[in-house]
Image (cartoon, helix red, strand yellow):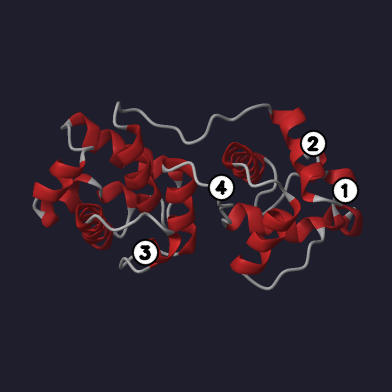
Amino acid sequence: MKTIQIYNILEKNYGEQGWWPTISSNRHFEIIVGAILTQNTSWKNVETAIKNLDKFNFLRKESIKQLDEELLGQLIKSSGYFKQKARKLKNFVEFLDSGKEITRENLLNIWGVGKETADSILLYAYDKPVFVIDAYTMRIMKRLGFKFRDYDELQELFIKELPMDAKLFNEFHALFVKLGKETCKSKPLCGNCCLKEKCKYFKETF
């Protein structure tokens, strides 16, 4: 099965997702903040932190720059690992002020920015055609029967088979998130899955 077939089935079943969800007028910077805060936590916890920052008008680069790191940590406490994440946000703002080019290599050189975070920022904040691989994507693709060793190998599969289209990558990743959260969970609800007829896990289990 080709990856575009997976996309077509998911898109037909769920429709357009319109991801990344934002609440402020400063969408670009809010996505960057969200991509950092979502590390090792649920989006629900990130939303609480985002709303807290927005409430005090802190969803701006200059605000993050000027905020005391300890206070910033308290504002984003709901996202977990808040002391580390406050430092990561400060580091990212320093990077933005440096004037360096927004490339994957440069993003990965920032302390606290890994592959998934860098790719999320490139795709959603800067509309670059980079396919984001997260835990949902890995879980779903493994259950479907695809073979890959790591993040890079799975990402390469999508890049090889799909046109380099940021909007397509955006929607495809969002559809994986939708399926992973609602159906293809740790304990999957296979009976409700629109991909079950194509799924190796379903066929072997049921």
Q: Position of residue 86 (x, y in %)?
A: 22, 56
- Report the residue marked by disc 4: 129
Cα–Cα gap, marks 2 and 4: 21 Å
The numbered mark at residue 154 is none
Q: N-terminal of the two: label 3 or label 4?
A: 3
The numbered mark at residue 198 is 1
Residue count near mark 2 (Cα–Cα under 10 Å), binned few <14, some 14–19, many ≥20: few
For badge 2, the amino acid type reads: Ile
For badge 3, the amino acid type reads: Asn
Cα–Cα gap, marks 3 and 2: 36 Å
Residue 40 visible (yes or no):
no
Residue 204 visible (yes or no):
yes
- Report the residue marked by disc 2: 9
For badge 1, the amino acid type reads: Lys
- Choose mark 2 or mark 4, whichever is in front: 4
**Element type where label 1 sits in the image:** helix
Q: Which of the two residues, 164 or 137, is positioned nearer the viewer here?
A: 164
